[in-house]
Image (spheres, grey):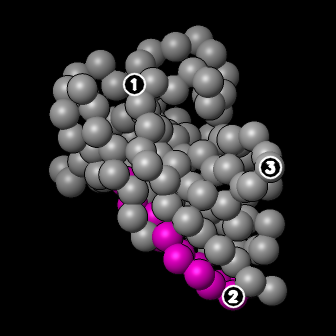
Amino acid sequence: QVRLVESGGGSVQAGGSLRLSCVNSGDTYNMYRMGWFRQAPGTEREGVATILFTGGSTYYADSVKGRFTISRDNARNTLYLQMNDLKPEDTAIYFCAARRYSFAPVLAAEDYDYWGQGTQVTVSS
């Protein structure tokens, strides 16, 4: 079983920054890709950014390109999401997720196999 634990959420003003972390543990031998997703009240879960489990091959949602950076530290089994120039529309619960190899679109939430519990990010104007 794979376990994912997020941290780093909080409340900031517009223009501020936050860094989310996600530590993975357990049986990760067949994990291929990891990602960050978010869900605001009344909306569907959307993909934010994704990276290969070993690092590299990053993809971003258009709404966060140039502001968010996904990275991975394999020595620490940790996935990061650096969020800069935050906007009120970035307010959501952010989830870390992992999936096995798949031909599905890299930001397709339904194709991810393991999920963390989520961390709240609130951006005020």
Which residue, given by chain and number where applicable, does mark 2 sit on? 13
Instruction: Specify whether residue 15 is painted magenta.
Output: yes
Residue lying at the far top of the rendered structure:
103
Which residue, given by chain and number where applicable, does mark 1 sit on? 32
Q: Residue drawn at (21%, 54%), measured in percent from left and top? A: 76
Q: Residue drawn at (56%, 55%), measured in percent from left and top? A: 94
- Mark 3 vs mark 1, foreground winner is 3
Q: What amino acid does circle 1 point to?
A: Tyr
Q: CA distance from mark 2 to mark 1?
A: 35 Å
Horizontal placement of 82 versus 91: left or right? left
The C terminus lies in quadrant: bottom right
Q: Which residues are magenta?
A: 9-22
Q: Secondary structure at mark 1?
A: loop
Residue 121 seen in render: yes
Q: Residues within 10 Å of mark 1 (few under 14, many from 20)?
A: some
Which residue, given by chain and number where applicable, does mark 3 sit on? 42
Earlier sequence position, callout 2 versus callout 1? 2
Q: What amino acid does circle 3 point to?
A: Gly
Q: Is residue 16 above or below residue 107?
A: below
Earlier sequence position, callout 3 versus callout 1? 1
